Image (cartoon, grey):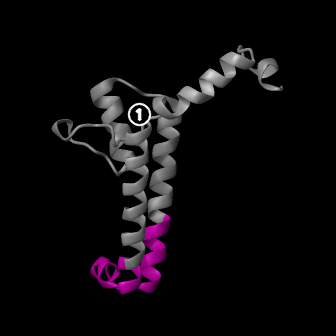
């Protein structure tokens, strides 16, 4: 395979690394409520990592920048169709989309608990 030539792993080591990756990825939901979590705002989470945990990597800085760009795009896009954030919240189609989204998050989190 191409992996061992690009990385310092043999085939078994590369499989172990890929298998461990999901448990090593952090997103903010693992932060306890006593520490201010869970974080759904990526920018706040990156600030938390930097200020509280001393973690300041290029990956997290870029993910914060990307989150802020994406959030601005979504807010500006919604402003074209809705006069206020209250109108967004009261829209039946937006409510249905949020219900579907929250259901999928619930199922995903249950699956991760079951697999642990």
Q: With respect to residue 38, does 103 lie above or below?
A: below
Picture quarter with the C terminus: top left
Q: Position of residue 35 (x, y in %)?
A: 20, 36
Q: Residue 64 placed where, x, y %?
A: 45, 45
Q: Is residue 12 above or below residue 18?
A: above
Q: Is residue 22 above or below residue 44?
A: above
Residue 90 is left or right of residue 4, and the answer is: left
Quarter of the image for residue 85 reads bottom left
Find the magenta span and give its range.
Answer: 73-95
For this orientation, the residue located farthest to the left is: 34
Could you tell whether 80 is left or right of 46 in the image? right
At 51% from the left edge and 35% from the top edge, which residue is drawn? 22
**Does the stretch in magenta take in 70?**
no
State the count of labels. 1
Residue at 38% across / 63% down in the picture? 103
Residue shown at 83%/26% (left/top)?
2
Q: Identify the residue at image location x=34%, y=23%.
A: 54
Q: Secondary structure at mark 1?
A: loop
The reply, left or right, for residue 53 in relation to residue 11 is left
Q: Nearer the viewer, residue 101 or 31?
A: 101
The answer to whether residue 27 is seen in the rendering is: no
Q: Which residue is mark 1?
A: 116
**Whole-percent x and y of residue 14?**
68, 21
Q: Residues within 10 Å of mark 1 (few under 14, many from 20)?
A: few
């Amino acid at each position: 395979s191409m992996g061992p030539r690009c990385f310092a792993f043999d085939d078994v080591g590369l499989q172990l690394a890929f298998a461990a990756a999901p448990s090593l990825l952090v997103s903010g939901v693992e932060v306890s409520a006593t520490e201010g979590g869970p974080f759904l705002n990526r920018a706040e989470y990156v600030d938390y990592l930097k200020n509280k945990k001393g973690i300041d990597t290029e990956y997290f800085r870029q993910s914060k920048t990307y989150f802020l760009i994406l959030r601005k795009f979504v807010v500006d896009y919604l402003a074209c169709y809705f006069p206020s954030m209250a109108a967004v919240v009261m829209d039946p189609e937006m409510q249905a989309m949020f219900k579907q989204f929250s259901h999928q998050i619930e199922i995903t989190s249950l699956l991760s608990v079951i697999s642990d």
